[in-house]
Image: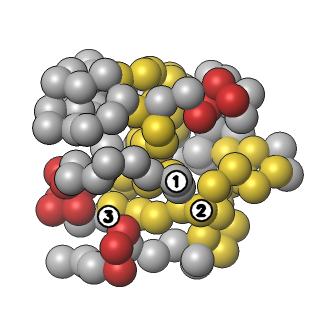
């Protein structure tokens, strides 16, 4: 199990979507999500078909936040060219956790594919 950490504080459990299939699916089909989802090799995300709004933190290769957006349903972000990954959480979580652009995030523990499946 892995955790998303900011300034020494554990924010949420963290799953990863590292294959094309898992990145494309993301949080689709869920009514809510208590953790955080790491989408590797991602510069843009969508909420087409999502049942709830999400916050997305786009991060560089060192997990420094380069942009944060809140997306309602049926939206697509513009590509964030400096981003190497995106972290999706339920809308409002990054503000609640006081995570801002420029902040350094960390991953502690062993990352596992979302739902324990992978291609």
Residue 117, relative to residue 12: is it above or below? below
Instruction: Rate crowding at label 1 as few (under 14), some (14 to 19) or many (20 or more) other CA atoms within 10 Å.
Output: few
Residue 105, relative to residue 80: is it above or below? below
Instruction: Rate crowding at label 3 as few (under 14), some (14 to 19) or many (20 or more) other CA atoms within 10 Å.
Output: many
**Residue with the mark numbered 2:** 13
Label 2 near label 1: C-beta < 8 Å? yes
Q: In which quarter of the image is the N terminus?
A: bottom right
Q: Which of marks 2 and 3 is nearer the N terminus?
A: 2
Secondary structure of the residue carrying tag 1 is loop
User: Of circles 3 and 1, which is in front?
Assistant: 1
- Circle number at residue 34: 1
Secondary structure of the residue carrying tag 2 is strand
Distance between the Cα atoms at labels 2 and 3?
Answer: 16 Å
Distance between the Cα atoms at labels 1 and 2?
Answer: 8 Å
Name the residue at the right extreme.
8
**Residue with the mark numbered 3:** 18
Q: Residue at x 75, y 45 (%)?
A: 6
């Amino acid at each position: 199990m892995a955790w998303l950490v900011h300034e020494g504080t554990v924010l949420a459990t963290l799953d990863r979507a590292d294959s094309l299939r898992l990145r494309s699916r993301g949080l689709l089909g869920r009514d809510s999500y208590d953790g955080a989802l790491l989408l590797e090799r991602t510069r843009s995300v969508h909420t087409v078909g999502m049942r709830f709004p999400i916050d997305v933190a786009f991060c560089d290769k060192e997990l420094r936040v380069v942009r944060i957006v809140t997306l309602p349903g049926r939206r697509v972000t513009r590509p964030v060219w400096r981003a190497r990954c995106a972290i999706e959480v339920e809308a409002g979580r990054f503000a609640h956790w006081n995570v801002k652009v420029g902040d350094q995030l960390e991953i502690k523990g062993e990352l596992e594919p979302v739902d324990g499946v992978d291609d």
